[in-house]
Image (cartoon, grey):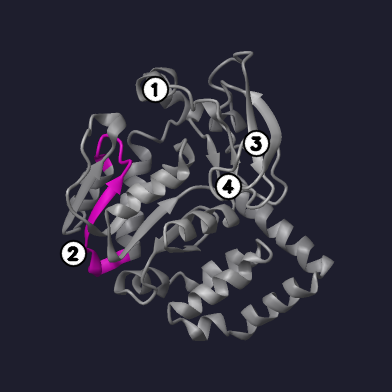
């Protein structure tokens, strides 16, 4: 059995899906079945789900197999729709502060998001993606590094996080997106999609394990958005959490014991009033008690949040 790529723990076979499966299969499969099975393993310790399906291939071979001219069928929003939506989201998140922020979009494709973000007022927004001909990474660090829908494509999660963080200033932040596993994760989860290149599927525990191995901390703002940082009281971390702390704690409460880690992290970042709010304390007490009713509520709320 393979060793977990996040924490080094023991992993076992979890499930097998067809290699042509995409995230779009939840609507209408864009490709016919290939008849080639892709095995995924799951770590007993951190619940990380991964496959070694592409591990023996070169970057060029993966580009030909996955990121080819038909990739847009697997991810129709990749080229134009998602960059525009994310650029607008970044404007909402950082507001007027964006005019002083210099950022890097790590794994930024053809660079459209970076161009749109700079047009929307960011002081500087660079892009780096070796799959799009960027052979050499930046020779500087940034206050903000973003990585949207990148880490699930990584065959070496630790190396990817280390490289992305190497471009982050000591007082900066890595802001990235990837879907966390649902509590009832199985073969029907739409994010398990080898034709999309989704070879690394994270849990709250696996993200925490990676951050710790990189000498950093992590907070999940939602099931999809996360920040990794080294200095909890840095201005940009506090800026992001200013309007997101309550939502982050509620989201963590839906992941059971992850609520305790999130509460401690928010306190470290200086958000004591949010961390010690009576509602959060009540959720922590219900989690600690193992209340079946609270567990059912968490499951229902997560299902609502995970609907396409």
Q: In this view, does 178 lie above or below 270?
A: above
Q: Do the residues labelled 4 and 1 touch (CB within 8 Å)?
A: no
Q: Quadrant of the N terminus?
A: top right
Q: Which of marks 4 and 1 is nearer the N terminus?
A: 4
Q: Which dot, 4 or 2, sits closer to the camera?
A: 4
Whole-percent x, y for residue 285 in the image: 73, 78
Q: Do the residues labelled 4 and 2 touch (CB within 8 Å)?
A: no
Horizontal relation, residue 249 to residue 42: left or right? left
Q: Is residue 170 above or below residue 43?
A: below
Q: Which mark is residue 99?
A: 2
Q: Earlier in the sequence, mark 3 or mark 2?
A: 3
Q: Which residue is drawn at 59% across and 35% down?
A: 192
Q: Is residue 78 visible?
A: yes
Residue corresponding to mark 4: 8
Q: Which dot, 1 or 2, sits closer to the camera?
A: 1
Give the residues in magenta.
94-112
Q: Residue 66 carries which label?
A: none
Q: Which residue is drawn at 58% across and 32% down?
A: 51
Residue corresponding to mark 1: 58
Question: Helix, strand, or loop for circle 2?
Answer: helix
Residue corresponding to mark 3: 41
Give yes or no for residue 205 being in the magenta stretch: no
Q: Earlier in the sequence, mark 1 or mark 2?
A: 1
Q: In which quarter of the image is the C terminus?
A: top right
Q: Are marks 1 and 3 in contact (CB under 8 Å)?
A: no
Q: Which dot, 3 or 4, sits closer to the camera?
A: 4
Count numbered badges in the picture: 4
Q: Earlier in the sequence, mark 4 or mark 2?
A: 4
Q: Which dot, 3 or 2, sits closer to the camera?
A: 3
């Amino acid at each position: 059995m393979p060793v977990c790529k996040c924490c080094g723990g023991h992993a076992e076979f979890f499930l097998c899906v067809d290699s042509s499966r995409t995230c779009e299969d939840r609507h209408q499969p864009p490709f016919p079945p290939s008849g080639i099975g892709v095995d995924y393993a799951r770590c007993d310790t951190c619940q990380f789900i991964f496959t070694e399906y592409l591990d023996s291939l070169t970057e060029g071979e993966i580009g030909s197999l996955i990121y080819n001219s038909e990739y847009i069928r697997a991810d129709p929003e990749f080229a134009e729709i998602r960059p525009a939506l994310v650029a607008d989201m970044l404007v909402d998140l950082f507001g007027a502060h964006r005019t002083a922020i210099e950022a890097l979009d790590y794994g930024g494709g053809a660079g459209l998001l970076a161009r749109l973000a700079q047009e929307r007022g960011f002081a500087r927004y660079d892009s780096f993606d070796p799959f799009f001909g960027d052979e050499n990474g930046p020779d500087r660090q940034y206050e903000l590094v973003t990585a949207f829908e990148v880490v699930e494509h990584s065959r070496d999660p630790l190396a990817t996080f280390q490289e992305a963080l190497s471009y982050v200033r000591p007082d900066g932040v890595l802001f990235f997106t990837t879907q966390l596993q649902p509590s009832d994760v199985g073969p029907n989860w739409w994010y398990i999609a080898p034709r999309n290149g989704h070879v690394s599927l994270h849990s709250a525990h696996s993200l925490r394990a990676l951050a710790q191995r990189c000498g950093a901390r992590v907070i999940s703002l939602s099931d999809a958005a996360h920040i990794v940082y080294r200095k909890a009281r840095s201005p940009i971390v506090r800026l992001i959490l200013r309007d997101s702390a309550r939502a982050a704690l509620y989201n963590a409460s839906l992941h059971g014991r992850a609520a305790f880690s999130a509460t401690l992290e928010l306190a470290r970042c200086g958000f004591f009033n949010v961390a010690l709010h009576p509602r959060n304390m009540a959720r922590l007490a219900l989690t600690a008690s193992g209340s079946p009713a609270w567990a059912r509520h968490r499951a229902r709320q997560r299902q609502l949040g995970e609907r396409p």
